[in-house]
Amino acid sequence: MFLLYHYSYAVSSKIEPFYKGGKVQVSGDENHIFCTCGSRVNVLEISTGKIVHSVEHDDQEDITSFALSCDDEMLVTASRALLLKQWDWRQAQCTRSWRAIHTVPVASMTFDSTSTLLATGGCDSTIKIWDVVKQYCTHNLKGSSGVVHLVQFHPDISRLQLFSSSLDCGIRLWDLRSSQCVCVLQSHYSTVTSLCFSPDGGTMVSSGRDKICTVWDLETKKVKRTVPVYEAVEGVVLLPENEDFSQIGVKSRDLHFITAGSKGVLRVWEASTARCVYTQTLPSTPVSGEEKDDDSLSLTCLLHLPSSSRLATVTAEHNILLYQLPALSTQQQFVGYSDEVLDVKFLGKGDSHIVVATNSCQLKVFELLTNSCQILYGHTDTIFSLDVFKKGSLFASCAKDRSVRIWKIDSDSGKVRCVALGSTHANAVGSITCSRMKASFVVSGSQDCTVKVWDLPPDLSKTEADMCQLTVRATEKAHDKDINSVAVSPNDKLLASGSQDRTAKLWSLAGEGSIGLLGVFRGHRRGIWAVCFSPIDQVLATSSADGTTKLWSLQDFSCLKTFEGHDASVLKVIFVSRGTQLLTSGSDGLVKLWTIKTNECVKTLDAHQDKVWGLHTNRKDDKMVTGSADSTITVWMDFGSNLRLFNTHSKHLIYTHIEVRTISYNISHLLPLQCIVSLSLLRYCVVWNTNARNCLDAQAVLQVLLKHLPPEELLQYQGARTHLEGLIPYTERHMQRIGHLLQASMFLNYMWQTMRVAGAPLEEGEEEEEEEEEVSVTKKASTNNRRLKNGESATTNGNHHSESEESSEDEDMEENTNDQTKIVKSHPVSPPPQCQTFVS
């Protein structure tokens, strides 16, 4: 059996940010969530968790606000360029655009219930009402103070009323019939964040950041009740009166509403008594929302989905969570923006999930097949590092809160919970590693310069009891500066540590209750970011901020090899291909693949725009995941191994370009590799198509692909659209070139059939025709001569000399013709010129 090197990693899938703050709106059919992301509005399909549509302004200006009509047909966006654009969002086409008339950007927008009127509130203290059907501005409402950050129509359109709020904290009621402000509802002393109306339209509840909610009687324009909620409220929703909400503390038919705010939990309030009847508890967290007030957990938006009886909340960390009423159980979670990804690992049975640590106190667990996410609560500060045990069902995390946690994923349901906790470090824990043979211990390295070995209970993976405490087996002061990385050898007997003090150290874990120093690796000019043991050799790999990666011998602690290629710090290093290759990631955003034997970089992967902190491979060693500070998580697949399998079946047809129909046969029969092979072939077609010598082969393979894969399915593959766009210009150029060649070849054939070389020998048939023509010409000439003799005898004598000269000239011409004929016969006729010579 021979060893296969990795050489052809390509992007398999990506988890990218789709929401970076701003407005969020749910479609009327409750199937999509619309959210802003810079200059785009992304449309998230709730059932699949995928972005199915996206609209973007051509000028790349940030979108300041948007509104979706109640019938889900029109989407209107406003940008900093003071343009309003109306979209057919399903086709991502702009159907109309017009100037907003506002002198500064639009801050808020809303449609009325008939999807006819659009209200825009600007930063210039004015409100404009637009008739989007007849396409003109109907109202220009003035009188607000400062930015109009909230506009909302009364749900009863017959009232023709608009509510707005600005920096003066008042709620203005506008009568659209008279274009006048009817009254200003004064109750709040800070920003009014949301409004909601009762079904009969006679009662309104307003929420504000002054930590109160106000119940209004819209008939009398008076305050019915002021409810202190003791947190800055960002959203309020009225509970339906005809449903049973006893599970969340609703015991009567009185008016109840739900609030979401700075404490990060949903709470249910009874309006008549101003009493909180229910407080949600964050999942997997022993501390309730009332006992803990963390800005990172605060909620910024609350939406009601009445048809499906759900609530949607948006967190300050740009996560969107869906809760099912009446129990307020978590149904779905979407991560809109991951911020800076610090570590990422494969997880679960068959590496079906990935766990991600970001610049946050929450862990995110993604299922790769569906992109569904779980948000894990437990740590109270930024999580720095992760590691997974051999079987993949247990993993460890460490954080700035000086704690170490052990988590367990259920193989059937995929649910993750914290099962163990250890917290005896004196400073932030920057690195953690798990035992390799069995789940018996973890090792942590801290900014307090110590290394700790934590013992796990033997039945930890089986217990269903409450979270237990980890016990420390040994503690050792390992370095003089922060410890950035720790790693355990494959036999669990050695420990390596890397530090900012520019050294790596090798430790023995064989002793009971102690860690023994075996040696020190010196040679890096700057701090060491990562250490990793080889899976087969007695070798240690280290990566450093000096831009190099080094291999060290565990026998004499000498440097065996140095790999140079990154332009900045090398943040991560791991072994692949059974220890024969290295993967490194750097702060330059690049991932490099090195072959140890030749000491050269065989592949550079560029898919990130910032530091690549996370790097990990699955247990089959055919996939890789990277996490970057640009908030993207990229899953890579080694298409090279699959292409080798494909080439074995197809007799290397990709490279030899023989019998394209056999490639068609293989694509049809290699169904598990269809996506992989199709993408690889498409990528090769793009390369081949750039050269006129191979363009016909590229077009033939492309024809096979399009016969077996519908264009819609092909476009769903990651990167397929980019490859197809690269094919178009070269294909058009080749088509023009072939058309010109075809035309030139036809013209040459025509010229060759019609042209004759002067004096060339003729065929027998052609000679006979020529003789007949000469005889007829002679007869005509003699007839003319006789006619001239009979009719012009008077001039015969005068022209005698000239006629004799003409006859002598004719004889000379015949002699010359005979001479030329002899000369032509002595030289064979040259063959017809080639097409290439003619074209040149």
Image (tube, rainbow, N blue to C red):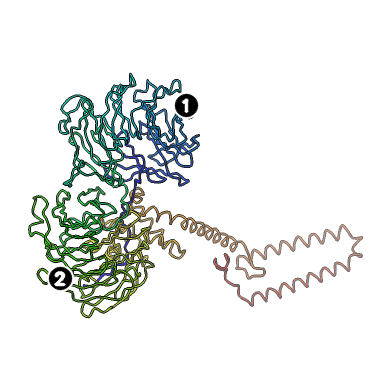
Q: Mark 1 packing: few (<14 Cα in 10 Å), some, or many (20+)? A: some
Q: Specify whether 213 is left or right of 754.
A: left
* Point 30% across, 26% down: residue: 204
Residue furthest top as drawn = 220
Could you say which is closer to the camera, residue 405 or residue 798?
405
**Camera-nearest residue between 655 and 510:** 510
Name the residue: 26% across, 54% down. 382
Q: Position of residue 5 (x, y in %)?
A: 28, 69
- Position above or below: 136 against 500: above
Instruction: Quadrant for the N terminus, please.
Output: bottom left
Residue 341 place in picture, x, y as percent = 30, 56
Compared across the picture, whether 492 is left or right of 360 comes to left
Provide the residue designation for mark 1: 139
- Please identify the quadrant where the C terminus is shown: bottom right
Residue under label 2: 515
Type of amino acid at the residue the image marks with label 1: His
